[in-house]
Amino acid sequence: MHNEPLTPAPGHEAQEAAPLSELPVTRPEGCPFDPPAELARLREEQPLRRMTYPDGHIGWLATGHSVVRAILADSRFSSRYELMHLPMEGAPAQLPPAPVGDMSGIDAPEHTRYRRLLMGKFTVRRMRELTARVEQISAEYLDAMERRGGPLDLVEAYAQPVPALMICELLGVPADDREVFQRHTFTVTDRSVGLEDQMAAYTAIQEILHALVLAKRAEPTDDLLSDLTSSDLTDEELAGIGTFLLGAGLDTTANMLALGTFALLSNPEQLAALRDDPGLADQAVDELMRYLTIADTGIRAALEDVELDGHLIKAGESVVLSFQAANRDPERFPHPDVLDVHRKATGHLGFGHGVHQCLGQQLARVEMRVALPALLTRFPTLRLAVPPEEVPLRTQSSIYGVHGLPVTWDEEASDGTPRRP
């Protein structure tokens, strides 16, 4: 199935402009949560525009919400890595095909086969059943934070270990291995390292998972990998899928927890609203996903000629999808540059859309819905321990976030009143 060709929106007549010379990537100084300002201008002028890629390919950049969403839902656009041109300087002229089990870089029928096997493992009901465990893990790390006292790095003390332990338990990975997986996962998503180093880190994760798959086949336990050993997946496919799920479960939610906390601390009214009304947690998660859009960019390649928004995208041409621009589109979200936890941000593209929509989004929702309010409730005086401009940002990663988030809080005196540490 695919969408009908879009007609140009009012004011967006498809008069072909000169191709962009590069993808805007520089965020406004002092605004760590905002997309590059140039993207808003491009979206207003022409939400689908020609762009010259670093390798000389003439492709497209999509910035409008309706255009990006339409491409994600259209089977005429491929997710296969080897068909894509990349918009980053220094990127290889051609990517190799996706490793076995990497669901984000394949199309049907292979993608459909994997997705059908996994969808039942990540249903809303099954993920909500994990709520009590997320609450327990969150409380344990908050207890440790309270015992240690501030200042401390929230990424190291809370944002990374909570989702890491959850995904390791879900897959059946020993908790002692999670630091190794975190280190390799960071390398895989780090744009500042070469493709060779990224592939080496990916291979290292797969080797550990392959050994784990063999152990699960020999002695199954109560976990996802053991469940999948009863399917028709090969050892190589199981290791690849495990690698894919680990990477998605470790890095993305950790960065959402850390960057989401940073955003709330920078918007105290929104922080207070969420802390005082935990019932806002579900829509606050969607709003933070929209507002922050940590997976800010995607790519698709046209498999055939496609008419879209008054333009003809020819077979073989790549389209960069700016999720961060689409999620700030005022035609879809009024006052999009404002963080509002009362907003019903349905339709955001923070989890993607279409057949490749994030498989583990329900797990991520449970983790964020529990972990963020728990943190704000336990430490009502939580604040940054450094000026905002000193928070180290992950600007060279395919997953945006912070390298660390130094925070502190007021201790309570014996009479229950806050006191400065």
Image (cartoon, rainbow, N blue to C red):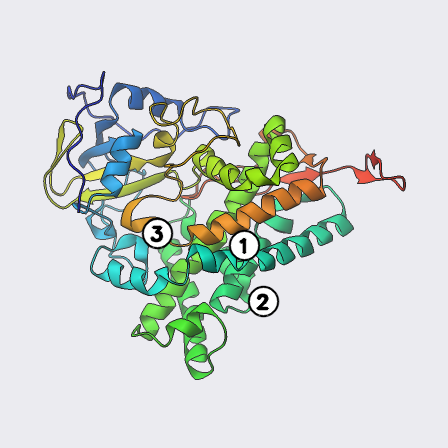
Q: Please report whichever mark, 2 or 3, sits nearer to the chain's N-terminal start.
A: 2
180 w.r.t. 277: above or below: below
| Residue at which label 2 appears | 176
- Label 3 vs label 1, nearer the camera: 1
Q: What residue occupies the far right of the structure in this picture?
A: 414
Question: 10 Å neighbourhood of mark 3: few (<14), some, or many (≥20)?
Answer: some
Q: Is residue 153 left or right of residue 314?
A: right
Give the spatial CA distance, label 3 vs label 1: 26 Å
* Label disc, if present, on residue 195 of the rendered structure: 3
Q: Are marks 2 and 3 in contact (CB under 8 Å)?
A: no
Q: What residue occupies the far bottom of the structure in this picture?
A: 218
Q: Is residue 176 left or right of residue 52?
A: right
x, y percentage for residue 47?
A: 26, 26
In the image, 377 versus 30, the foreground residue is 377
Quarter occupied by residue 96: bottom left
Q: Are marks 3 and 1 in contact (CB under 8 Å)?
A: no
Q: Is residue 33 left or right of residue 271?
A: left
- Residue at image position (31%, 57%) is 103
SS class, disc 2:
helix
* Label disc, if present, on residue 163 of the rendered structure: 1
204 w.r.t. 18: above or below: below
- Residue at image position (55%, 44%) is 257
Q: Quadrant of the C terminus?
A: top right
- Residue at image position (71%, 44%) is 378
Question: 10 Å neighbourhood of mark 1: few (<14), some, or many (≥20)?
Answer: many
Quarter occupied by residue 235: bottom left
x, y percentage for residue 375?
A: 65, 44
